[in-house]
Amino acid sequence: MGDDSSSRTDGARRPERHRERGDGATALIVVDMLNTYEHEDAERLASNVKPTVAPISGLVSRARDDDVPVVYVQDNYGDWNTSAEKLARQAMEGRHPELVEPILPPDDAAFIIKARHSAFYQTLLEYLLDRDGAGRIVLAGQVTEQCILYSALDAYVRHFEVAVPRDAVAHIHESLGDAALEMMERNMGAEVAGSDQLRFSSSIS
């Protein structure tokens, strides 16, 4: 069988998988914000989510204004027949719709369903980011010491640059959330700053 590289129609626009860290554009990833808050530790989490809603909403607005890709990655809660619309409806019918309504996914945002903590594990997120030419991600959402931390680690080992707006991620346990932010900053080289200080461009020259 001969070399079929010349017949590949997408070869010219397929980015290199093994990118240099930070290469490419930025994407905003919003993690697990469609929550019914009907689980263990839900009220503790909800109280910490409340101050993050405005910063997350602001990041989404800024990203859309700047033509930065916005991707919502959402746990399916074990429902393998779910959809973005169903998850949004369930969250709005949950205990804290006031935490959901301001940050419902815009119609033009990509939506990816996940089953585990990491936004990357067995999902199409890496493929989507590669297709968009994104080498840097801004992670917002919940929970800082769980899904945000694991998603940041999976991004780091895939050579993405990571930024985390500390006022746009919500913890359950403050000490663990603070430790997670420190680990992301120290061990993964993540940019950790307030959402108003983060820019949708690389901090690495």
Image (tube, rainbow, N blue to C red):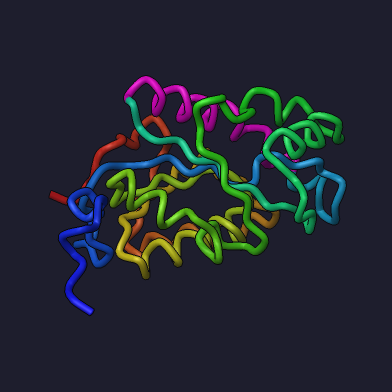
Residue 92, by quadrant, is top right
Instruction: Please name the residue shown 76% across and 55% down the image.
Output: 80
Q: Is residue 178 visible?
A: no
Residue extent of the magenta highlight = 46-66
Between 41 and 28, which is closer to the camera in this rendering? 28
How many numbered discs, if any? 0
Q: Nearer the viewer, residue 172 or 77?
A: 77
Q: Nearer the viewer, residue 86 or 197?
A: 86
The x and y percentages for residue 38 are: 87, 46
- Where is residue 180? Give x, y as percent: 52, 62
Whether the magenta-drawn stretch holds residue 93 is answered as no
Left or right of 147: which side holds 82? right
Quadrant showing the N terminus: bottom left
* Left or right placement of residue 168 versus residue 69 in this view: right
Residue 49 horizontal/vertical position (percent): 67, 39
> From where the camera sits, is residue 121 visible?
yes
Quarter-wise, where is residue 27 in the image? top left
Q: Main secondary structure of the magenta part?
A: helix
Q: Residue at x 18, y 51 (%)?
A: 12
Residue 54 lies in the magenta stretch? yes
Please give left or right for residue 72 compared with residue 155 in the image. right
